[in-house]
Amino acid sequence: MNQQPEIDRLADLVAASKYMVALTGAGISTESGLPDFRSPGTGLWERVDPMEVLSAEALQFRPEVFYTQGLDLLGAFREVSPNPAHKALGRLEEAGILKAVITQNIDSLHQQAGSRKVIEVHGNLRDATCTQCFRKYPFAEIKSQVKRGIIPPKCSCGGIIRPDVVLFGDPMPPAFQEAVTEASKSDLMLVIGSSLQVVPAAYLPRLAGQLAIVNLEPTPYDAAAAVVIHGRAGEVMEALSAELEHRGVI
Ligand code: NAD
C-alpha cells in the first residue's frame, strides 16, 4: 500500500512543530529482534504472563518465580542493535526538532541510536538497586548471583538486589513526572510502536497538542490523531527521514 500521502502529512506536521516529543513502546524495537508483549503469535504475553512473573508481588512473596521465570523473560532482551526507527529519532533530535523521547522500553536502544534526552518511564536493564540500603549495582550482578544459586540476590548489607525496571504493581518512578512535563509542553507527539493500553503511560497522549501515530495495529487514540500510519516503524521512519531530508528540514 502506498503510504506516501500519510508520510507527506506527517512530514508537514514535523516540519511545522515547535516542540515535538516522541512516545515509544515495545513495537519500535521488534524490528531489532525483541518481541513485544501483545503482538499475536510473537508477543511475550503468549508464552508466560509478565504480570504474574514480573510483578512487585512476585518479587516480594515468590522470589524463586521472579528470579527464575521473570529473569528469563528479561533475559529475552539480549544484546541487539537499534533499527532505522531508533536512528531516525536520534537524527531528529540532532537536527533540533525532537526535544525528548519518552519510552516505555527498557532496552536502551534509543541511547544506542544517539538520542540524548531519553525519559525511561518503565526503568532500564542497565542497573539494579538494593531494596534496603539503596546501593547501586550493574544489572549483571543479579544474573551472576542467580547463576550461582543465590536467590534472591543479596547486597553486602544483607538486603535484596532488584532490577531497576518498573514491575507490575510498582509505583511510577520520578521520570514519569518529567514525561508529563514534556508531553504537556509538546505541540506534536509522535507515538511509535505502542498499543497505548498500558496506563499511566497511555494517558500521556492526552497532554500533547497534536498527535501522530505509527503502529502496526489500531490504538484507542487513532480517532484523535492528526495522522495515523499503520505500518512497520523502521520502514515508516526511514521514509519520513528521506522526506524531511528531501525538504531540507534535517
Ligand atoms: P505493547 O506490546 O503493548 O504494544 C506494542 C505495539 O507495537 C502493538 O500495538 C503492535 O501492533 C505494535 N508493533 C509491533 N511491531 C511493530 C512494528 N515493527 N512497527 C510498528 N508497530 C509495531 O507494547 P507497549 O505499549 O510498549 O507496552 C508494553 C509494556 O511492555 C511496556 O510498558 C514496556 O515496558 C514493556 N516491554 C518493553 C520491551 C522493550 O523494552 N523492548 C519489550 C516488551 C515489553
Image (cartoon, rainbow, N blue to C red):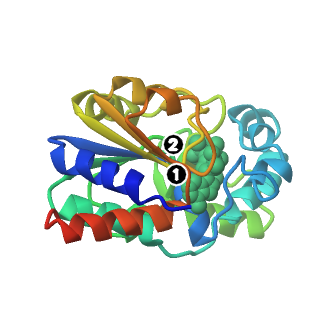
Give the residue at x 42% y 29%.
Answer: 204
Measured as percent of width and height from the top left, residue 89 is found at 33, 60
The quarter of the picture where residue 208 lies is: top left
Residue highlighted by disc 2: 122
Identify the image quadrant of the N terminus. Answer: bottom right
Q: Closer to the camera, 48 or 1?
A: 1
Looking at the image, residue 124 sits to the left or right of residue 55; the answer is: left
Badge nearest the viewer, 2 or 1: 1
Q: Amino acid at mark 2?
A: His
Measured as percent of width and height from the top left, residue 199 is found at 56, 27
- CB at disc 1 and ligand 1 closer than 8 Å: yes
Q: Is residue 109 above or below residue 173?
A: below
Q: Is residue 191 above or below residue 202?
A: below
Q: Which mark is residue 105?
A: 1
Given contact means CB atoms under 8 Å apart, are the residues at marks 2 and 1 in contact?
Answer: yes
Q: Is residue 15 visible?
A: yes
Distance between the alpha carbons at the discs numbered 2 and 1: 7 Å
- SS class of the residue under badge 2? loop
Looking at the image, residue 115 sits to the left or right of residue 160; the answer is: left
Q: Is residue 99 visible?
A: no
Give the residue at x 55% y 50%.
Answer: 230
- SS class of the residue under badge 1? loop
Q: Closer to the camera, 87 or 212?
A: 212
Measured as percent of width and height from the top left, residue 134 is found at 47, 43
Measured as percent of width and height from the top left, residue 205 is found at 41, 30
Q: Closer to the camera, 124 or 111?
A: 111
Identify the image quadrant of the C terminus. Answer: bottom left
